[in-house]
Amino acid sequence: MTFELVTKDTSTRARRGRLHTAHGVIETPVFMPVGTQATVKSMTADQLRDLDVEILLCNSYHLLLRPGHETIRQLGGLHRFMAWDRPILTDSGGYQVFSLSSLRDINEDGVRFQSHLDGTTHFLSPEKAIDVQLALGSDIMMILDDCIAYPSSHFETEKSMHRSLVWAERCKQHWEEFEGRTPKSEAQEFGVRPSNSLFGIVQGGIYHDLRQESATRLVAMDFPGYAIGGLAVGEPKPLMYEIIDRLEPQLPAAKPRYLMGVGTPADLVEAIGLGVDMFDCVMPTRHARNGWLFTKDGHIVIKHAKYKDDQGPVDSTCRCVVCRAYSRAYLRHLFIANEILSSVLNTIHNLYFYLDTIRRIRQFIEFHHFDEILTETRKAGFTPS
Amino acid sequence: MTFELVTKDTSTRARRGRLHTAHGVIETPVFMPVGTQATVKSMTADQLRDLDVEILLCNSYHLLLRPGHETIRQLGGLHRFMAWDRPILTDSGGYQVFSLSSLRDINEDGVRFQSHLDGTTHFLSPEKAIDVQLALGSDIMMILDDCIAYPSSHFETEKSMHRSLVWAERCKQHWEEFEGRTPKSEAQEFGVRPSNSLFGIVQGGIYHDLRQESATRLVAMDFPGYAIGGLAVGEPKPLMYEIIDRLEPQLPAAKPRYLMGVGTPADLVEAIGLGVDMFDCVMPTRHARNGWLFTKDGHIVIKHAKYKDDQGPVDSTCRCVVCRAYSRAYLRHLFIANEILSSVLNTIHNLYFYLDTIRRIRQFIEFHHFDEILTETRKAGFTPS
């Protein structure tokens, strides 16, 4: 994987870049829809391609439990399994272990946990997290990190951050050993692209000194890219931006930066202005299934009675296939009638909104006018969450 | 609407025809997927067009309750509401009144019933059933008929059949009055095509003499098409075929015949051999959502553990987009994980199976070799139900 920095905005830190992967080129800034269980909920691969989705995020935790990463490896890897021929980023599984499973035991070696599905016991170590992601055939893998709750004390956060650094080192070593010992033919046999990549994850909670230390030591390990983890977990938005603002200069300009699990359209604009290149969030897809639809003027809650006879589209400025063909009245009917098509159409619209927002941002960066979109976003002032 | 008889098979009664409607031409024999609540469950209009669905059936009962036929009329009619530009056939609502609602009172004038959704009271008369379907802007409307349970005595069945005949006459009269008094401009204003059509429905249960009487008197009323109702309600399959067999000569050859709510792929083949042109059934779509998938060799139940590692497609001879892209292992995973995409992909496959079966049958009729497909179907002997 190589990262090409195409241009930088002149009055902000916004960047236009290009990630070259074995499954194609990703323009940045990029938004990655979440395909939790090897499917972006309700979307066919064709629909995702029609939306021009460039890269998906899939969750290792869910896939190692069901159907199992070894099963997916035997079936030719995750791309083939879900019929997705563009890049896939996988997380390490750590975040879901901490948020979904019954946590049993965490120590320096890794974390033992119970499946949220059936209570079976599993063990996730840095090495195992890499093995899972290699079995899936991910294009961009993430290190296993220790995820702590917000708020946590400086002492607890430092301890956790140090553990994450040790795990980062072990992940990188394990990945390099695999890369080194795997002949290209074998890698192909197991559905694994030899050119996959591994990102480090900066931790340190809300403490600037810990964030600096985490970043400095990860950069010394020389990862192909850097993620910012442990944000959008409950801390105030201004604090989140401040942390990114002060952390960003520590990250090498020649490597992509990925803000994990963020966020609203306004969050994306702010973070891009601070030099972030990659994002993932369940917000467009989850909100879609709950009938919350994004528009240029904020959002609408489609179940409201006022849309019963509304012939207009969700957003009159939107060019998505849903806004071109269906009325708010029809979308309300589908939601009220609990029809599967409600989730399908709402998801298409919300994903289009996010992807179109990102495409528009790219153009503004190219013309060195990103500050205009930043001003416009702050003026609109809506922050759906 | 006009019906063109293209060719007839030489050794069976199978017919190849063409229905010309205001929303396009329908080749017959035809299978109509069911779009109960103004949506074929889980399918976008684009996906239905990609499948080359030629005509949909929608349920007046569901739509008059939610969102309401007047709402749909104000929104420009059902075609515009659901973004479907090809023909739509609507039933009269009668069947669901008898099967879904809390029945309150039936008399010669119509039927008073309680909504299965909220218990509100509604009244459906022959005239109202036509008004609802005119408001929806249906291409092919059905008369309101009295639907009785199986088994019923000869006496009860005769009484019910006579009531249906009276209602048929009133439906036709009401439709003709509307057609006569509605200037084209007004019809268009209300989203109603002036060229819509009305089918009579032959009733009479399992009694040949009652079926004959019903057919004879309906034919005397001169409907544009004739449906066979009250079958596939629990009677033995051989009896159903026998009734169609003996009824068919009473139906005018120049008009289309529609067997309501039928059936399995084998049922379609048998009934086409007896001279039926049109079918609708929830089987392909409902079975899809339950993980029951049709194949050339019978069916598979996708949740079975034996498909966990199965790299093959649902049906190796199938050319649908699902069989071309996804493995049984992936479809099993989606079903087990309760993913929406499971319903979507399974529905695409099952609808393709039905539509492809019908397309194949048309070719055999054109070459006057329909008996071969009949023999093949009987030899296979599987009748999923």
Image (spheres, coloured by chain):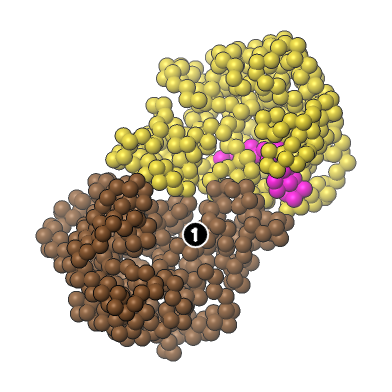
Chain colours: A brown, B yellow
Q: Residue at x 52, y 69 (%)?
A: A385
Q: Quadrant of residue B270?
A: top right
Q: Is residue B376 above or below residue B172?
A: above
Q: Is residue B225 left or right of residue A201?
A: right
Q: Position of residue A9 (x, y in %)?
A: 41, 85
Examine the structure image and report whether residue A180 is included in the region drawn in magenta: no
Visible residue check, residue B76: yes
Q: Position of residue A76 (x, y in %)?
A: 26, 48
At label 1, the amino acid type is Arg
Q: Secondary structure at mark 1?
A: helix
Q: Is residue B334 left or right of residue B244?
A: left
Q: Which residues are magenta?
A: B53-73
Q: Residue at x 41, y 70 (%)?
A: A233
Q: Chain of mark 1?
A: A
Between A166 and B57, the one lying in front of the other is A166
Between A29 and B51, the one lying in front of the other is A29
Between A257 and A213, the one lying in front of the other is A213
How crowded pointer 1 is (Cα within 10 Å; few <14, some 14-19, many 20+) is rated as: some
Q: Position of residue B55 (x, y in %)?
A: 62, 38
Q: Residue at x 49, y 63 (%)?
A: A284
Examine the structure image and report whether residue B54 is included in the region drawn in magenta: yes
Q: Quadrant of residue B198?
A: top right
Q: Is residue B154 above or below residue B201?
A: above
Q: Residue at x 57, y 63 (%)?
A: A293
Q: Position of residue B314 (x, y in %)?
A: 38, 36
Residue at the spot of label 1: A286
